[in-house]
Image (cartoon, rainbow, N blue to C red):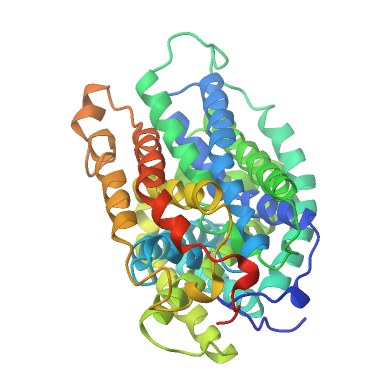
């Protein structure tokens, strides 16, 4: 399998390949791992019981997955990565604002997943391998896969999907056999502020994948239908995320102090001999499965930012250099934050919501309702093309979308006055969507119609 030649450039029609089912497996495998499991466990930390945790997790994934999966259809249509397409909305330089946020997201998820994977790899060696060194080793493995690129990633995720599904069926059966607290399935008296806060966390989990999705569909044939792209992406991500999150809830209730060492506790579910070794390996493979996506997206977003301000030819060596830089930064962050994981992770997920919600609203409204999927790919790569350096209308809408969320925020470092008034409920994602989507449509509809160049008329190159 050869090292991938492309990075942020357009994928020519004669190089398009892959089966639509690959979209299911890439998102299924990447979520069948311990990070969404810990994310689901936050429902219990926030005071929900099993019944309400399950309801909120299923509802949140169903809602968030809609936004995530509709981004996936942009890949076959445009043949370019997800975030570079934001230049058509924000301008070539203006797009660096959401791109920087997304780079932080990739690095943050890489680091948080790396901590859990490092704990598992350390546990596999009976702690003979220091957790920090384990994090570094996992990062090196992830780095090598990422450098090879797209086809290896899809191949890896296909095989891991099958392995994970088989193993986690046994783990789930074992988890539901654990003794659970009384009234775990009661629907009486939920803490509604915490229901809404948990819903925000779960919805954000799905929306946080929105900047990734077209990266893994951009090599597919242009005629691939929106419906099929949506369904396979949606099913893969929603089924696996909900499964792992609910499993995390059950384990948190059934195992005392489960979150104090989640990797070890999961590994010991199948016993402390061969069973635990198998689970440690599965956890490590799961972290590799998702961190390959995080690192792949991080280097492409960093490449997009760099290419906007420096005329640079993205050769294989340059591409590898970007991957290595992002891997080093994320690994250092993982080692630094390993000791205070849970608080850092919760704040990180909520922080993402506040900046990703307005972006996803703008991007989807632009693609489906304003430009109807018709873009000049050539101008996306030009500083002085039809999309310009900055689109101040979009940047203003984006700023407004973030600002209106502030009163509804609830994190350990800041709680908005309206969130306090609602007992700690965080509905910022709803407010951000409701404001950003129609506002963008109103201010951009006429301007975008004057800019549109059909895809067939574009000169497609980097």
Given residues 227 and 322, the one toward you in this image is 227
Q: Quadrant of the N terminus?
A: bottom right
**In the image, residue 387 lies at what x, y percent?**
41, 68
Residue at x 27% of width, y 22% of height: 423
**In the image, residue 369 lies at what x, y percent?**
52, 46
Residue at x 75% of width, y 47% of height: 228
Q: Considering only vertical position in the picture, is 436 above or below 314?
A: above
Confirm whether residue 278 shows in the render.
no
Q: Considering only vertical position in the picture, is 191 above or below 25?
A: above
Q: Considering only vertical position in the picture, is 360 above or below 59?
A: below
Residue at x 18% of width, y 30% of height: 417
**In the image, residue 285 lies at what x, y percent?**
66, 61
Residue 105, picture quadrant: bottom left
Horizontal side of 74 relative to 195 (left or right) equals right
Given residues 383 and 102, the one toward you in this image is 383
Confirm whether residue 457 shows in the render.
yes
Residue at x 31% of width, y 55% of height: 393
How many numbered marks does the figure carry? 0
Horizontal side of 216 relative to 398 (left or right) equals right
Q: Quadrant of the C terminus?
A: bottom right
């Amino acid at each position: 399998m050869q090292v991938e030649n492309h990075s942020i450039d357009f994928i020519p029609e004669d190089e398009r390949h892959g089966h639509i089912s690959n979209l299911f497996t890439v998102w299924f495998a990447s979520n069948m791992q311990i990070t969404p499991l810990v994310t689901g466990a936050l429902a219990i930390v926030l005071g929900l019981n099993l019944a309400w945790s399950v309801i909120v997790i299923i509802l949140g994934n169903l809602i968030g997955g809609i936004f995530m999966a509709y981004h996936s259809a942009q890949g076959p249509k445009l043949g370019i990565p997800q975030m570079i397409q934001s230049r058509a909305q924000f301008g070539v330089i203006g797009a660096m604002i959401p791109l920087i946020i997304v780079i932080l997201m990739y690095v943050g998820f890489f680091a948080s997943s790396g901590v859990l994977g490092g704990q598992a790899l350390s546990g596999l060696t009976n702690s003979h391998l220091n957790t920090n060194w384990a994090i570094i080793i996992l990062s090196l493995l992830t780095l090598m896969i990422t450098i090879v690129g797209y086809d290896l990633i899809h191949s890896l995720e296909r095989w891991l999907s099958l392995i994970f599904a088989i193993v986690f069926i046994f783990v789930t059966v074992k988890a539901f056999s654990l003794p659970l607290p009384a009234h775990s399935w009661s629907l009486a008296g939920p803490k509604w502020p915490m229901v809404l806060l948990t819903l925000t966390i779960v919805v954000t989990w799905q929306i946080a994948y929105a900047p990734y999705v077209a990266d893994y569909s951009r090599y597919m044939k242009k005629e691939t239908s929106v419906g099929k792209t949506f369904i396979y992406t949606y099913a893969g991500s929603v089924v696996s995320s909900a499964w792992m999150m609910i499993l995390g809830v059950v384990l948190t209730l059934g195992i005392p102090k489960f979150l104090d060492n989640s990797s070890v506790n999961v590994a010991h579910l199948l016993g402390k001999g061969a069973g635990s070794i198998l689970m440690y390996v599965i956890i490590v493979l799961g972290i590799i499965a998702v961190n390959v996506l995080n690192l792949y997206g991080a280097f492409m977003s960093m490449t997009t930012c760099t290419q906007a301000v420096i005329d640079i030819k993205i050769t294989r060596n340059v591409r590898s250099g970007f991957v290595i830089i992002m891997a080093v930064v994320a690994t250092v962050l993982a080692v630094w934050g390993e000791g205070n994981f849970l608080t850092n992770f919760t704040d990180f997920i909520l922080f993402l919501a506040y900046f990703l919600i307005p972006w996803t609203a703008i991007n989807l409204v632009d693609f489906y309702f304003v430009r109807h999927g018709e873009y000049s790919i050539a101008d996306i790569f030009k500083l002085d093309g039809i999309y310009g350096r900055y689109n101040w209308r979009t940047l203003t809408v984006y700023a407004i979308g973030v600002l209106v969320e502030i009163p509804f925020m609830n994190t350990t470092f800041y709680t908005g006055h309206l969130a306090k008034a609602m007992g700690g409920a965080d509905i910022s994602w709803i407010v951000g969507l409701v404001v950003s989507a129609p506002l963008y449509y109103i201010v951009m509809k006429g301007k975008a119609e004057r800019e549109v160049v059909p895809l067939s008329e574009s000169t497609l190159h980097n």
